[in-house]
Amino acid sequence: MSPLFIRRLIVWGVSFALGFAVAYILVVVGLPAININARGMTIERYGTIYFLVTMVPLALVFVVWLDKFMGTKILPD
C-alpha cells in the first residue's frame, strides 16, 4: 500500500470518529441543555437514522479539513 492510501484511510477513520464524537455530544449533552423535555436523551431514543443523518455531514466537514491539512488530495483542487 502506498503512503498516500494509508494517509487517506487515516483521514477517513479520524473524520468519522470525530463526527461520531461531536454528534454524540450534541445529542446527549446539547439537546438536554436547550430542551427540558430531552432529559436522559440517548442515541436509541434520538433514533439511529437521525443520528446517522447528524453524524455523516459532521464527519464530511472533518474530511475536508483533514484533507487540506494532511495533503491527501481526496478533494480536487
Image (spheres, rainbow, N blue to C red):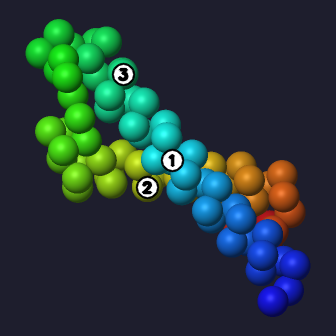
The residue at 73%/71% (across/down) is 8
Instruction: In the rendered view, tell whether residue 44 sits above or below residue 49.
Output: above
Instruction: In the rendered view, tell whether residue 14 sits above or below residue 27.
Output: below
User: What residue type is disc 2 on?
Assistant: Val
User: What residue type is disc 3 on?
Assistant: Val
Q: Is residue 1 left or right of residue 49?
A: right
Instruction: In the rendered view, tell whether residue 66 sits above or below residue 12.
Output: above
Label 3 to label 2, Cα distance in Å? 19 Å
The dot on residue 29 is: 3
Task: Report which residue position mark 2 lands on.
Answer: 56
Q: In this view, does 9 lie to the left or right of 19?
A: right
Label 1 to label 2, Cα distance in Å? 7 Å
Mark 1: few/some/many CA within 10 Å (<14, 14-19, 20+): many
The label nearer to you, 3 versus 2, is: 3
Q: Are marks 1 and 3 in contact (CB under 8 Å)?
A: no
Quadrant assignment, res 2: bottom right
Q: Are marks 1 and 2 in contact (CB under 8 Å)?
A: yes
Picture coordinates of residue 31 (x, y %)?
28, 22
Picture coordinates of residue 32 (x, y %)?
26, 17
Q: Which of disc 2 and disc 1 is earlier in sequence?
A: 1
Task: Report which residue position mark 1 lands on.
Answer: 19
Q: Which of disc 2 and disc 3 is earlier in sequence?
A: 3
The C terminus lies in which quarter of the figure?
bottom right
The N terminus lies in which quarter of the figure?
bottom right
The residue at 46%/47% (across/down) is 20
**Of residues 63 and 28, which is closer to you in this image?**
28
The residue at 69%/72% (across/down) is 9
Picture coordinates of residue 42 (x, y %)?
23, 35
Residue most toward the bottom?
Answer: 1
Label 1 to label 3, Cα distance in Å? 15 Å
